[in-house]
Amino acid sequence: MRDKLLVKGVLATLAYAFIMSVTSLVAKLVQAEVAVSVLVFWQSLLCVALLLPQQRGHWRRHDMKVWKTHFLRSISGFLGFYFFYLAINHIPLVEASMLRACAPLCVPLVVLLVHKIRVPSSRWLPLVLGFFGVALIIKPAPSQFDPWHLVGFLSAIGLALSMVTTRMLSKNVRAKETMTIYFLISAVLSLFLSVYSQASLLVPVHLVPHILVVGLTLYFAMYLYTLAYGFAPASIVSPVSYIGVVFSGLWGMLIWGYIPDLLAITGMLLIFASVLLTTYLSGHK
């Protein structure tokens, strides 16, 4: 029985990783004609439309502390996606995806800031390995440095904060309530940015199917991710989800002919190794 659940968890994670790579791919393609804030607005609105009916009859009263956590989780999740979409406009999809996938490495530092819990000494080795890998992808040499890689890494920090605050909310709040409020706040923030930057909310007719694909794949990817964690432990789901970077790399080669250089590949391997080590330590603490 346990083996069957693990297989289901792995399959759900693989499906999540593939679908999420499709979300990223289509998001990169449409941004030639659609502003980032507009794309985030429509994907958020579509997810709200899918989630609201599922929340009917499940809303609960919460104290101010829970609402503050909701707001922090929503802001961080919004920034995570916004920075990621900005980054894929300027750097290869596989590198942006790898930088975003560094979120688990940032979690201990976020926990230190939010909860004042120090990073255990056993976690420093994977952290150093992972951040060294990030440095190789960012290429800090003046001749190769691209600030958009830093924007990609900011998406990982936003995602890490959203992971920590989601965990905080999970004790008192349904997962679908958390997602509904997140997408509502994301829609409002992206609408504000669109109005501020004078970006038109009207999407070219030929790109409407693309926007629908982004929103629907994002929704189903998050559903599969939640499902995967129900079937298998984080020590299985987290490493397997990194196959999404491989999918992004394949999209990059097929569509743009991009092949990562040796530094980028080495950095990716170091990050993957650090996540494997982190998940191993988490399972043996």
Image: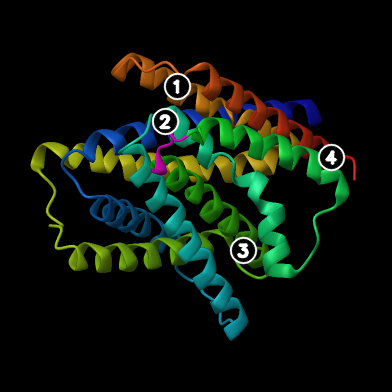
Give the residue number, with chain letter if any, for mark 1: 249
**What is the CA distance from the residue labelled 2 to the residue labelled 1?**
24 Å
Front residue of 192 and 271: 271
Place residue 25 in its image quadrant. top left
- Which residue lies at the image location 48% right of the left edge and 57% below the top edge? 77
Count the marks: how many? Answer: 4
Question: Which x, y percent locates residue 114?
Answer: 68, 68
Give the residue number, with chain letter if any, for mark 3: 165
Residues at marks 3 and 2 touching, judged by CB atoms closer than 8 Å: no
Give the residue number, with chain letter if any, for mark 2: 143
**What is the CA distance from the residue labelled 3 to the residue labelled 4?**
22 Å
Prevailing SS of the magenta stretch: loop
Which residues are the magenta region?
Answer: 142-147
Q: Amino acid at mark 3?
A: Thr
Asked which secondary structure carries label 1, the reply is helix
Mark 1, Cα crowd under 10 Å, few <14 / some 14-19 / many 20+, is many
The residue lying furthest to the bottom in this view is 64
- Which residue lies at the image location 60% right of the left edge and 42% below the top edge? 227
- Which residue lies at the image location 40% right of the left edge and 61% below the top edge? 183
Give the residue number, with chain letter if any, for mark 4: 281
Residues at marks 2 and 1 touching, judged by CB atoms closer than 8 Å: no
Mark 4, Cα crowd under 10 Å, few <14 / some 14-19 / many 20+, is some
